[in-house]
Image (spheres, rainbow, N blue to C red):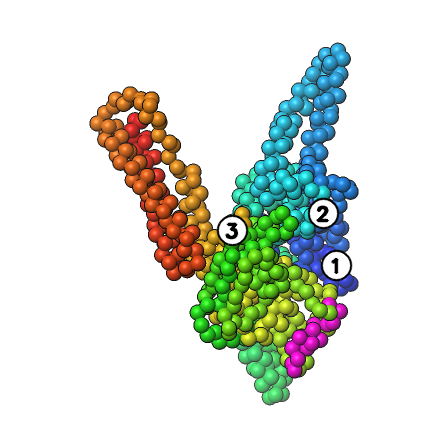
Amino acid sequence: MIEISVNGLKKSFEIGNNILDGVTFQVETGERVGLLGRNGAGKSTLFRILTGELEADEGDVVIARGRRLGLISQIPVYPVGFTVEDVLQTAFSRHRKLAEEMEKLAASMAAGDSSEETLRRYGELAAKFEGIGGYDTETAVSKVANGLSISKDMRAQLFDSLSGGEKTRVNLGRLILEDTDVLLLDEPTNHLDLHAVEWLEDYVRRFKGTVIAISHDRYFLDRTISRVIEVCGGHAEFYPGNYSFYAIEKERRYLEKLRRYEKEQAEIQRLTETATKMHEHGTELLHKRAFSIERRIERIRQTEKPTKSRTMTNRFGEKEFFGDEVMQVREMGKAFGERQLFRGVDLRVEGGERIALIGDNGTGKSTLLKILMDEERPDQGWVKYGPTVRTAYLPQIIYFDNPQRNLVDTMLYAKRGMSTQTARDRLGAFNFRGEDVFKPVSVLSGGEQSRLRLCMLMDEEINLLVLDEPTNHLDIDSREWIEEAVESYEGTLLFVSHDRYFINRFATRIWELENGVITDYPVPFGRYKEIKEREKALAYAQPQPKAEKSKPKPVPKGGKAQQAARKQLTICERELEKLEAEVKTLEAELEANACDYEKYSVLYARKEELDGQMLELMERWEKLAGEAEG
């Protein structure tokens, strides 16, 4: 069944410049569609037309009858005094209307109304109320709030007091609770931490309705969509697969179109030269043949020259690093009032390491980076850098001394001695071209400001690069530009990010900030995820405590196979007890040697080995327990 039908959609905000220029597509019931395109391509405009917020200049949009669309994009305005809980409860307006009508009917029946019509209507309403989960709304709210890291304290806060990211999270929870038929998600993973993003992915995969998502999170797209609609040049192009398929197929189509274009151009050049020679000879017959060839040339001109986003050619200027130790942190602690962000942080960074600092929103990751960059003072402890370390810092919130200056002047003021042409060349490498370079910095989007700041950092000679959410608000092309720059950078890297693609590509070491403590995992992101999954599995797979000896149970009788299984089960339990004791000892040694990186790595490798053995024994224990019970 066709859920959404769009035909010949056109929309412009400037005369003669159609942002949408004849977009046509259909979405079937239950499809998972990714709506891709560069920033400014018209994706959000298309969403607003689908929901009726904007009117198209031309074309039609048809939504299947009775289908409800839910859009998470701009934050709605709620009445003054609304708490987060009030906002979440607005998702149950249908439930409340049904409940009110049921209360009226119940009052009528209590007053003596026992007519068949009243009883029938009450029964219909009760069945419908139960069907939409009217008796269990509190459980639904708690489930969604926990998944999106909306704590009980936050639920009691005034909605207006929240940050932009927190408002986005709450509004996403409200949309999910509304239980719409079609989810329109406009950058849903912005401002979400890793746990919330993974929860949202799982929710989208299990969602029974239709999903159309605008996102620059490549991991999210790979795990949630099965079809791509790309808005490019005002038109729609289609790719029957997830993001990885789209990326490969887009490149294949580009190369195929380029080959076709080059073949046509070679044929046109050959025919043009032939026609020119015929005209030069000047006979009437040759002139006629030349005109015939020229008409043939016009028929050949069918393929436009394909274009491709420019890649970034600049790279960080690197300063040679001497020594082993880049940075050392000792007994670092920071609190705001009674809220302790972290304490007792002891860390050591060596040259060439690439470290990802991860953790839930609000745990203090950005604050820690600010302390390391000397923009914030710690309550306890200190940080020491090697004598030849030179840092560059890209903060999450970009600040410019004079945002009214244009881009060229901003570069010239920051880099004394740089010529205007050099400044324009560097800006052009970061996709700031033409008249754009004379815009004031204040009119740039958040992503464009990040790109400008990165352009300025590229000129620095550095050996420690610190990035705080470097890919936030950037489209996929811009993310790839940053990744290319980081890829070519050979110095030490420390970054905060929720972009799993970025983390997986660059991190060789993970710092996890949780409950005020940083746990150091000297492994890449993929290995870190395996360790966390194993820890979770071990937590769930612990064998039940044995019965007390004071009340021995009679030994159950059984065949020889069962008796053999019981013996093996006893041996397995003893081995588990030994491994558990050794793991406890290792954990104590790990804590004692947290400052000794080499020894910590050896101990950690041994602990991982023991964890693997325990997991195997757990699986064997479960199998033997089943055999022993017959």
Magenta residues, as a range? 403-418
Q: In which quarter of the image is the N terminus?
A: top right
Mark pair 1, 3: CA separation: 52 Å
Q: Which residue is drawn at 47% across and 52% down?
A: 519
Name which residue type carries label 1.
Ser
Q: Residue at x 42, y 49 (%)?
A: 531
Q: Residue at x 66, y 63 (%)?
A: 398
Element class at badge 1: strand
| Residue projecting furthest to the left | 560
Residue tagged 3: 517
Q: Which mark is residue 161?
A: 2
Residue tagged 1: 12
Relative placement, left or right, of 244 versus 108 is left
Residue 605: percent from the left, percent from the top?
36, 54
Name which residue type carries label 3.
Val
Q: 10 Å neighbourhood of mark 3: few (<14), some, or many (≥20)?
A: some
**Disc nearest the viewer among 2 and 3:** 3
Q: Which of marks 1 and 2 is nearer the N terminus?
A: 1
Q: In which quarter of the image is the C terminus?
A: top left
Name which residue type carries label 2.
Ser
Residue 538: percent from the left, percent from the top?
40, 41
Element class at badge 3: strand
Q: With respect to residue 216, does 404 lie above or below?
A: below
